[in-house]
Amino acid sequence: MEEITPQGEDFSRWYLDVVQKAQLADYAPVRGCVAVRPYGFAIWEAMQSNLDERFKATGVENAYFPLLIPESIFKKEAEHIEGFAPEAPWVTHAGEEELSEKLVIRPSSETIIGTMFSRWIQSYRDLPMVLNQWCSVVRWEKATYPFIRTSEFLWQEGHTCHRDENDARKRARMMVGVYRDFLQEELAVPVIDGIKSEREKFAGAVDTFTVEALMGDGRGLQAGTSHYLGDGFARVMDIKFLDEDGEHKLVHQTSWGVSHRLIGAVIMVHGDDRGLRLPPKIAPKQAVIVPIYRQDSRSEVLQQANRLQQELAEARISVHLDDREGYTPGWKFNDWEMRGVPIRLELGPRDMEDEQVVLVRRDTGDKESVSWSGLAQKTTDVLDDISENMFKQALDFREKNTRAVDEMSQLKEIISGPRGYVLAGWCGDAGCEAQVKEKTGATIQCIPFDEAKYSEQACLCCGSESGRTVVFARPY
RNA sequence: CGGAGCGUAGCGCAGCUUGGUUAGCGCGCCUGCUUUGGGAGCAGGAGGUCGCCAGUUCGAAUCUGGCCGCUCCGACCA
């Protein structure tokens, strides 16, 4: 197996190495597209099922809408089309025959779903309507990067209709909270939740809420967004309901999504020079058993390994017995470490005598002997501890790489040097925001919800006292 | 979309400057034997339209032009 480029030497190369060598994805013969391999897809499936459960607990129903959207419908909302038109791919022909109306391959489904909403919603009793679809979308990106920005990507998009602004805003805020909890509790990725500036918000949204995470190279990543759409889409797509008072009214909408970009986030937040480190709650395999034997002890060791595997499986631990022939134990150790499996259990002749295994943690590298009798409980406990520790390590990293400044020159120095998050004041003016980006390369990741922690501060651009602290970073 | 680099076996590369035997090497892969507590050893074997298209030439992996793809930096990006 080949080496992985060390993070310190070239982080980007390291990331690409991990993606390929841990067999998460591979380049496909389509510009900017990857094939997600079984191991990478298993991570996505784990994220998917966990999120889906969280969605449903808040009343979300799943549905499915067409991949193709007629031009006339796609173009109904001006800001939306302006945002997406440059990267929209079109279907113009069926066979040799030109279509009477061209069809865009969805970059997001507000317009097509809105069209269906207008037929399905008649009365205030039909509200709220809270739907979600798991699908892929296409955006013809100029610069692509596996998982983080690809031309086609897997995601979920939630779309909801509400009776009034307050109800819709509550839903949009609720979903950004679901994303925050999911990232922190399941992916062990600490986030800052907040609102996007006018410049950074979604095309067609009134407000965009976001969860932001800091990657291992000090660049910021938008990990999930939730939008309050107002009644703009409702107006152009005629989504109206008859209210209690006998008046026809426009619905207020939200949309929200996370994508397989989250896989990229997990890689870049937790990975190290040995490769991937997967948070236990979304690891396709939480533990792997590596048997060690000589010819004469082979069947004995394998038999015991099988017994242990079964016991762990009964304790609802996802466990894999690596009984491949022709690979040495040392090779397997390295292989599973590269692929990020949280716990390795070694079972060899010495362990057979003492009725124990050697348990090795991927997060710390710590080894200890554990008796067979207490193995399932011990493994469960260690998995929980790994989850906590990985979150703590990521949070420590973020705190060490978050710096507060008052002046643009300091921001510039940090962004061109160690990077990380930079806390600075901003007055809310788009001109100041543009100037900061121009001069430093940093953009506003978000204006944090937490006003106590991120309070008033003079604008680092114009000096206005009316500013408050926001989070700057060099973004992905 | 601009600047730079790369494209030869699954992966990493040599060969190209100065055109000319059957295009090599390492890793991986297949078979067999010996091995197995941190990336095993030996022996044998399979695997190539040299990114694509055109041109120059008796002859092109090698020279020329165009195109495509990937990587890095920048621009753009909800």
Image (cartoon, coloured by chain):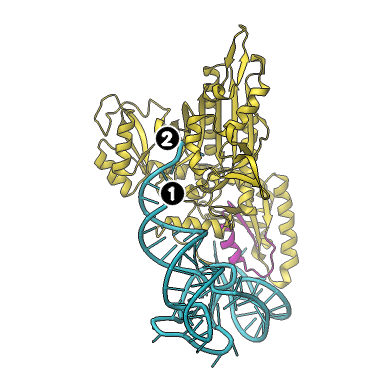
Q: Position of residue A447 (x, y in %)?
A: 39, 31
Helix, strand or loop at label 1? It is loop
Q: Position of residue A174 (x, y in %)?
A: 54, 26
Placement of A64 over or under A269, stated as above or below: above
Residue A290: which quarter of the image?
A: bottom right
Q: The magenta stretch spans which residues? A: A322-347
Indicate the chain on which mark 2 is placed.
A
Chain in yellow (letter): A
Nearer to me, A227 or A232 = A232
Q: Position of residue A126 (x, y in %)?
A: 67, 18
Please tell me if label 1 and label 2 are on a single chain: yes
Q: Which residue is mark 1?
A: A216
Q: Which residue is pictured at 67% across the width and 60% down the height?
A: A322
Chain B visual colour: cyan
Kind of residue sitting beneath label 1 = Gly
Residue A443: which quarter of the image?
A: top left
Q: Which of disc 2 and disc 1 is earlier in sequence?
A: 2
Q: Position of residue B45 (x, y in %)?
A: 68, 82
Q: Which residue is pictured at 34% across the width and 26% down the height?
A: A455
Q: Is residue A310 left or right of residue A240?
A: right
Q: Is residue A35 left or right of residue A142?
A: right
Nearer to me, A423 or A158 = A158
